[in-house]
Image (cartoon, rainbow, N blue to C red):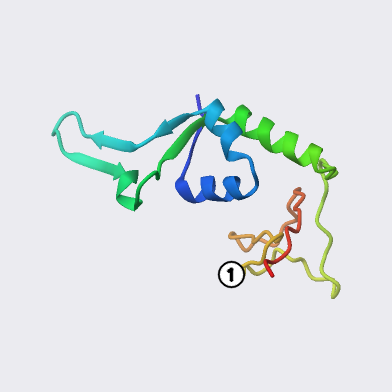
Amino acid sequence: MGSGLLLQPTGLGVLAELGMVERLMSLGSPIDRIFGRIASSDRVVLDVRYSALGKGWRALAIHRAALFGTLHDAVSAAGIEIVHSARSNPSSDGRSPWRRPRAHPTAGGIADPTGSGESLATTSIDCGRPS
């Protein structure tokens, strides 16, 4: 149905830092291994064992709405305004910030990988830089 997500260990680490991982773990199913085989040839095409990363590593299968609800609740609790259908403003020199993707974009920026330079109807939150 396309409504499920598999949060990888890196993403779970970020969500843990934000204090959300316990709630998300209660809403999803932990995944220790992903295995795929071609039925007609019995050939293994995917075998990811999260334990190979170290003790306690796993992914989390979760419904998209559960992730969205948890993120939305956290943003609302923090008093962050949610702005819908906002357009980005051009940079101070009048050029679109989406024209040239950067190799290492900074937090809060969105790169346009197509290079089309078209405005993106998005809102980004500048999370700042670690000190």
Name the image quarter holding the C terminus: bottom right
Name the quadrant containing residue 98: bottom right
Give the image location of residue 117, x and y in percent: 70, 62
Disc 1 designates what residue? Answer: 104
Residue at 26% across, 35% down = 36
Q: Is residue 111 left or right of residue 89?
A: left
Q: Is residue 35 left or right of residue 122?
A: left
Q: Residue furthest left?
A: 41
Answer whether residue 4 is visible to the viewer in this image: no
In the rendered view, tell whether residue 103 sits above or below residue 2: below
Q: 115 or 54: which is nearer to us?
A: 54
Mark 1 residue crowding within 10 angstroms, few (<14) / some (14–19) / many (20+): few
Give the image location of residue 29, x and y in percent: 46, 28
As shown in the figure, which amino acid type bears the numbered disc 1?
His
Residue at 64% across, 60% down = 112
In the rendered view, tell whether residue 73 sits above or below residue 100: above
Residue at 58% across, 31% down = 64
Answer whether residue 95 is visible to the viewer in this image: yes
Give the image location of residue 9, x and y in percent: 46, 47
Q: 82 or 73: which is nearer to us?
A: 73
Q: Is residue 38 left or right of residue 53?
A: left
